[in-house]
Amino acid sequence: MTNGNFLKPTILIARENPGEDNDLAGLLLNKNISVIRVESGSEALRVFQTNPAISLALINADLPGLNGFDTAHEIRKLSPSLPIILFVNYVNIESIRLSIMVGCTRMLQNPVDPDELDTIVEQYLLKREDYAESIDK
């Protein structure tokens, strides 16, 4: 969207413990970004299927029911270009292999550094023409 018609980007945060994402959500809300929080993989998938405005998915690997790897895989099938960032408790060969297999754009280790996340979110959202225009003004 151009000519000042700015649609606020929406980020899906899927983390089992809502308290885990308070800092993440606060960081994102300060950037004029809508945040949808869910606590399970199946809920994340359902929300994603009914909300085409989602611009970025932040998914914890350890989710109840449908885990984060499977959730990312299902979302990737629905949206091949959506940036998906997976949070893992331990980065190792297996988590790297799985995140690549399911189509994650990026993987970060918990706890997430707010400055690093800020940089990454800006990087992926700046690819959106309407968001880039809004922060240039």
Image: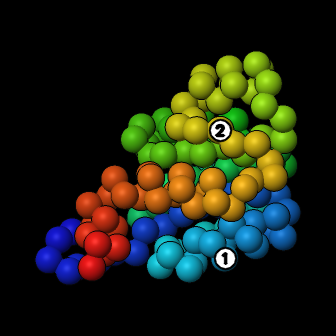
Quadrant assignment for the N terminus: bottom left
Name the secondary structure under disc 1. Answer: helix
- For residue 86, above or below residue 111: above
Q: Residue at x 74, y 71 (%)?
A: 23
Q: Position of residue 35 (x, y in %)?
A: 58, 71
- The image quarter in which residue 9 lies: bottom left
Q: Badge 1: how crowded within 10 Å, few (<14), some, or many (20+)?
A: few
- Please give the name of the residue rendered at 46% of the width and 42% of the height, measured from the top-left corner: 78
Where does residue 32 sit, x and y in percent of width and height? 47, 79
Q: Residue at x 26, y 61 (%)?
A: 129
Q: Is residue 66 left or right of residue 11?
A: right
Disc 1 marks a residue whose amino acid type is Gly
Q: Which mark is residue 26?
A: 1
What's the mark number on residue 3?
Answer: none
- Residue in the foreground of this view, choosing between 18 and 127: 127
Q: Residue furthest left?
A: 3
**Residue 84 vertical placement versus 13 (above, below):** above
Above or below, 21 against 87 in this view is: below
Residue at mark 2 to residue at mark 1: CA–CA distance: 21 Å
> Looking at the image, what colour scheme do you see?
rainbow
Residue with the mark numbered 2? 107
Residue at image position (81%, 52%) is 111
Q: Amino acid at mark 2?
A: Met
Closer to the camera, 4 or 136? Answer: 136
